[in-house]
Image: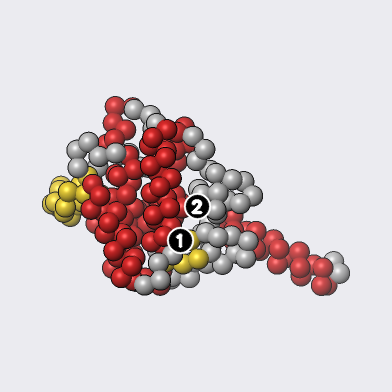
Amino acid sequence: MRIPFGDYPRGAHVATALVSTSPVVRRRTGEALPDPVALARFLAEHGVHPDALAGGRPPTGTDLDQTYALRREIRDILASGTEEEAVAGANALVTRAGTGPVLAPDADGGWRWCVTTAPGATLADELAVFTGTGLLGVLRALGHDRFRRCASPVCDGLFADTSRAGRRRYCMPERCGNRVNVANHRARRTRTGR
């Protein structure tokens, strides 16, 4: 798998999305990745095509268990108290199966810096390199304060805010943000008697 350095928002987005699949975050609905089929669907939805699944190999139960462990590691990085802890955690993800930076051709006939994964790396290790590279990009370009807790009072989600303005408040805006907006609307209606 080849991960371009400049594509860190995509890696950070997948890291956030993976953490958001946890039953710790989805208290009402539970585990969003209950089986290998759900993991395959998650990867497809996020456009992640690991070499470990080349040739159409579907994820296995072992892949799923290793992805659960990775998800906990990413959550710990997003919750880290210091920038140094976050960098150390993300570096550990990248070095798990990353082979170092290489210069590779891009679609426009130019060159771009990439991290590649080692041949034979597991699915979880490739995801570790991809998400770790994304998190390191956020730390370098935007800063540690972009690792945040969800502002919803009923959510324990964490996320990496890669938005331009840096004002994102929810791990899943379409879910947590909407839930808060609906609750606020109902409270206003109750106060005004409408």
Q: Which residue is mark 2?
A: 20
Quadrant the C terminus occupies:
bottom right
| Residue 68 placement (x, y as % from top left) | 43, 45
Tell me the element at label 1: strand
In front here: 115 or 10? 115
Q: Which residue is mark 1?
A: 159
CB under 8 Å between discs 2 and 1? yes
Say few, some or many: other residues with alpha carbon within 10 Å of mark 1 (under 14 / 14 to 19 / 20 or more): many
In front here: 77 or 100? 77
Q: Is residue 130 above or below residue 194?
A: above
| Residue 184 placement (x, y as % from top left) | 70, 67
Picture residue at 33% right of the left edge, 67% below the top:
85
| Dot label at residue 177 | none
* Amino acid carrying mark 2 in the image: Ser
| Residue 9 placement (x, y as % from top left) | 35, 58
Picture residue at 39% right of the left edge, 54% below the top:
73
Q: Mark 2 or mark 1, which has the lower sequence index?
A: 2
In front here: 141 or 33? 33
* Amino acid carrying mark 1 in the image: Phe
- Say which quarter of the image contains residue 76: bottom left
